[in-house]
Image (cartoon, rainbow, N blue to C red):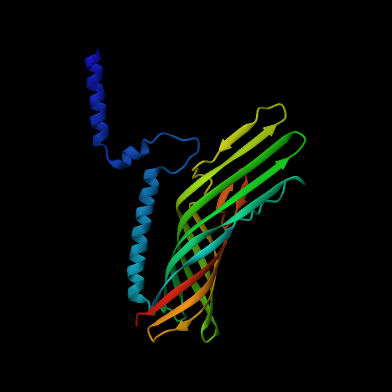
Amino acid sequence: MTRVATNETVKRKNMSNALPSSTLCEAEPATKYPTRSTCQRSYQTRALASTLLVLLISNVVLAQSVEFSGGLNFSSFPSDRTPPSSNAYTKNNGGRGVSFGVSYTGFKKFKNNVRVSLLVDQYEGEVSAGDWGTSYRDYLNVSFKKTTIAAAIYPFNFNLTPNTFFAFGLELNYLIDHQTSGSYIGSRYQSPPAKETYDNESNIHSTVCAGASLRLHHEFRITDKWSISPQYKLFAGITPDLAARQNYFFAIRHSALLGVTMKLT
């Protein structure tokens, strides 16, 4: 019987080694929350990277100028939840981060000066919420650090002065990495306290976050082909960046950037 069991074990190992990677990914152990598996995240990240590479190449061919920018950002995360009682509260502590991007302007197919940007943002923050009464208590606290890839389009561009420009558009952020820690503690009358931990928990973060984007910059011409531009960028989320225990937190991100622009044509 031992030899038969050993043979069956060897067969199972050989079969698992022969399975494609997608099948093995589906066999990952279940977690407490329905999160994306590591393999699913890697597939989505590779697909997104391929799409961005195609956009980079095609925009270079179609655009008349390209800008590379980088700088610092500061984020806050207000909540839109109406306090259910006079004791309820929500708080957020903003954090600093870094931002990088490449932008294209002067597309020949558009009459106005449409701007398209591909961005990478790293930002952090901490949010908390609480409520208590005579028979219950609820406390939530989450701190996190995120990295996102974003695509932004600015169809509305205005010249405030010959060298000062204002742009308004939409931005779509995709979460590629995060570090998360936090917990929820709740208690009810004559019931044992409930506790949830959010250590490296993906389910509370939005995979895709959309928002409005504003950009203000002043251009300093160096040569006919090159220029530099200090700029301010504001992202205001219209979909939640984080959601936990019926608390929805939206990202407000301020960025101070320095851009270097090169004319392509």
Lateral position of residue 70 relative to residue 14, left or right = right
For the residue pair 171 and 141, the one nearer the viewer reads as: 141
For the residue pair 151 and 183, the one nearer the viewer reads as: 183
Viewer can see residue 219: yes
Seen from this angle, which residue lies furthest top? 1
- Which image quarter: residue 191? top right
For the residue pair 187 and 114, the one nearer the viewer reads as: 187
40 over 47 or under it: above or below: above
- Residue 260 rendering spot, x and y as whole percentages: 42, 75
- The residue at 44%/69% (across/down) is 117
Viewer can see residue 206: no
Which quarter shows the C terminus?
A: bottom left
- The residue at 41%/77% (across/down) is 261
- Residue 172 rendering spot, x and y as whole percentages: 48, 61
- Residue 20 rendering spot, x and y as whole percentages: 27, 40
156 over 73 or under it: above or below: below
- Which image quarter: residue 25? top left
Count of marks placed on residues: 0
Lateral position of residue 188 relative to residue 245, left or right = right
Lateral position of residue 258 relative to residue 184, left or right = left
- Residue 237 rendering spot, x and y as whole percentages: 57, 60
255 over 64 or under it: above or below: above
- The residue at 49%/74% (across/down) is 155
- The residue at 66%/46% (across/down) is 129
Which quarter shows the N terminus?
A: top left
